[in-house]
Image (cartoon, rainbow, N blue to C red):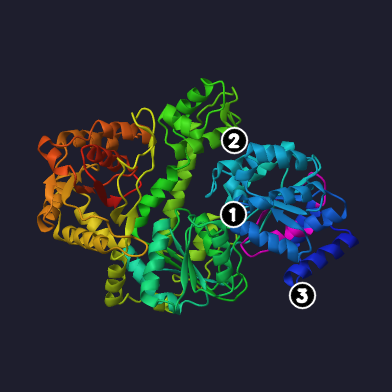
Amino acid sequence: MNTADLDLTADQAELASDVLHKMAGPDAALRDDQLTAVAALCRPASRVLVVQATGWGKSAVYWIATAIGREAGRGPTLVISPLLSLMRDQVEAAARAGLTARTLNSSNFEDWAEIEREIGDDAVDVLLVSPERLANPTFGRRVLDRLGGRIGLLVIDEAHSISDWGHDFRPDYRRLSTMLTRLNPEAAVLATTATANARVTDDVAAQLGDTLVLRGPLARSSLQLVVLEEQSPMDRFAWVCERLGELPGSGIVYALTVDQAEALTAAIRAVHGDALPVAAYTGRLDGAERHRLENALRRNEIKALVATSALGMGFDKPDLGFVVHVGAPPSPVSYYQQVGRAGRGIDRAVVVLLPSEADRHVWDYFATATIPVPSQVESVLDALRQEDAPISVPKLEAQTGVRRTRAELILKQLAVDDVVERQPDGWVATGKEWVYDKAHFDSVIATREREATIMREYAAGSRCLMQLLQESLDDPSAAPCGRCSVCDPDATAAWRQPVDPALLASVQQALRGQVATLEPRKMWPGAPSSRKGRISATVAADWGRVLVDYDAPQWAGLVRESLSADMPASDELRTAVTQVLAAWSRGDRRNPAWERRPDVVVDLASGGLPVLTGSLADHIAAVGRMVRARLDPDAVALGARRVRTEDLPSAAQAALWEGSVQLDADSADAVRGAAVLLIADRDPMGWAITVTAAALREAGADVVLPLLLHRTNG
């Protein structure tokens, strides 16, 4: 598109200024690229991609373009937005601009009927929906088909998600480019992002068609970037606890996992109490609680949200004073996106990365998490082709052996290429053939590995941090910033002081006192397992306890030294388990005590560590004056080997353990009428414990109390 003749009429320019002043104050003026983008979007069927730094004002472009379009009699704007927090911010921003905005999402279902009536009456200027909502066929028929022919402007926010070269590839987002054919042919399209390198930019522009690309410099002069030397997971927690009060204003502390975020929140509260209020912000929270916490941070009622990536794109707090990462994302692009939350409306904000070798396995997982496995894809397609009716995801899992979460991802990816289609009752094959593009996916993996290499270079602090981030986004203006911990180490020396050893010990002790519960499964998986339906109370396990919950930093040394090899239980492990049992016997308000003290102990080496579990059970039996009962070790060992070497879905694992759990002949009498403590090493899907508990109950045990030594993802 030729930009030389792009300009607004006098009336359009006056309206643009009015909207901008409502949003940003009477002294605000449009940047050159903002003006160019708005002028282009006033033309029918135009395509514009804006790649600009966070805080640049990308949303102002589509609010002004919407206002001009609505004044001219065009239809409403449809905004595709990835997160509820982003939608809420955009609804509020649209209101400031004088526009009527509505959102249809999982948290406001009760309002849908009224909102759809407003849409039908053309009383809505802006409708915001998630890409996942667009993929819902019922929503598509009820709302999108009626709206599509009237849309005046389509906005694809965080447009890097369209591209599988991007750091946040989402299959439902990828389908948006094909949705363009369903729109009003005269509708303009705007895609925006702050985190796209040249390859992602080219890919998105190609998907949109003849696209005007407006790309600006990405350096953020308000950010002081700091990288510390590699630390242990526990040292990082202690650093945050010690330094949080010194960080300016209020901010965000990012963790790589939900469990890390919740544990770090507990550690901060243990050290500071109410003096430094914090809260965990993760995908486990419902929409209302997320909204409450976002507003609390905006109003500076809390010092920090300890968050996963669930808090990121779109969250807007101009005076956010700091962002701390307890572990870096695997991509410099996603890291830039998250640190961009800080320093939007203030002169200085602090950004600190606390790296650790322990983060590398998370990076390895993300490198291949979205890459389809050809054998699994063909298995899913074969199942769909053999059925005359739509198939649900649970049924596909049972028929194919592909785990549910993986099957859902495969179906979304196939839907991008129209190989499958989602209907209200399930999924069907369209008849179109699927071809695995090995060269393409190999390139995607290679790209992600290169990004991980860049993050290792960033964490090592070998050269200017801002320049490295800019270069990773192909910013031609990249240059040393003069402010980061590499450019000016003296100015950031205070953040690199060692943590007080006494504080470190107190944080570790506080976290080791936390209780992690093990909820019993409620339903059997069905075939090929011989059991189906609800798990009866007569064979179910009781609520249990977990010693090491996933990658809990307070137990990192114990996992490394005692739970990673099959050897007799160490003194540290014995002491830790004894403390868990003592706390279990007392209980508390949230985690009640067992109703009956165990009098028999059984070990289950479901993770393949029979020497460890056996020696630990022997010790507990001796100190607790319990009877020692045993399962058939050969049968359990065979089951454990198969679980470790085969990617088995739920039903297959349950069936496997049904054939692998047998009481030793001398132990059958011991469990009758007993309360059994069942000690297991690892059981990622929970079927080893569930099946074993059922076998013990069927052998006459009154209660089975599971104690899982290490809860893992796999």
**Is 127 displayed left or right of 422 in the figure?**
right
Q: Is residue 528 above or below residue 202?
A: above
Q: Which residue is mark 3?
A: 27
Q: Position of residue 599 (x, y in %)?
A: 16, 52
**Is 694 displayed left or right of 333 in the figure?**
left
Q: Position of residue 416 (x, y in %)?
A: 59, 35
Q: At x 60% / y 53%, what residue is drawn?
A: 107
Q: Residues within 10 Å of mark 3 (few under 14, many from 20)?
A: few
Question: Of 199 and 308, which appears nearest the observer?
Answer: 308
Judge whether residue 713 is colored magenta. Answer: no
Q: CA distance from mark 3 to mark 1?
A: 31 Å
Q: Position of residue 580 (x, y in %)?
A: 24, 60
Q: Residues within 10 Å of mark 1 (few under 14, many from 20)?
A: some
- State whether residue 77 appears in this view: yes
- State whether residue 33 appears in this view: no
Hey, what amino acid is under mark 3? Asp
**Range of the magenta residues?**
42-64
Question: What is the secondary structure assignment of the residue under circle 3?
Answer: loop
The answer to which quarter of the image holds residue 50 is bottom right
- Choose mark 3 or mark 1, whichever is in front: 1
Tag 1 or tag 2, which sits nearer the N-term?
1
Hey, what amino acid is under mark 1? Leu
- Choose mark 2 or mark 1, whichever is in front: 1
Hey, what amino acid is under mark 2? Val
**Is 478 displayed left or right of 404 in the figure?**
right
Q: What numbered label is drawn on residue 416? A: 2
Task: Give the mark count.
Answer: 3
Q: What numbered label is drawn on residue 83? A: 1
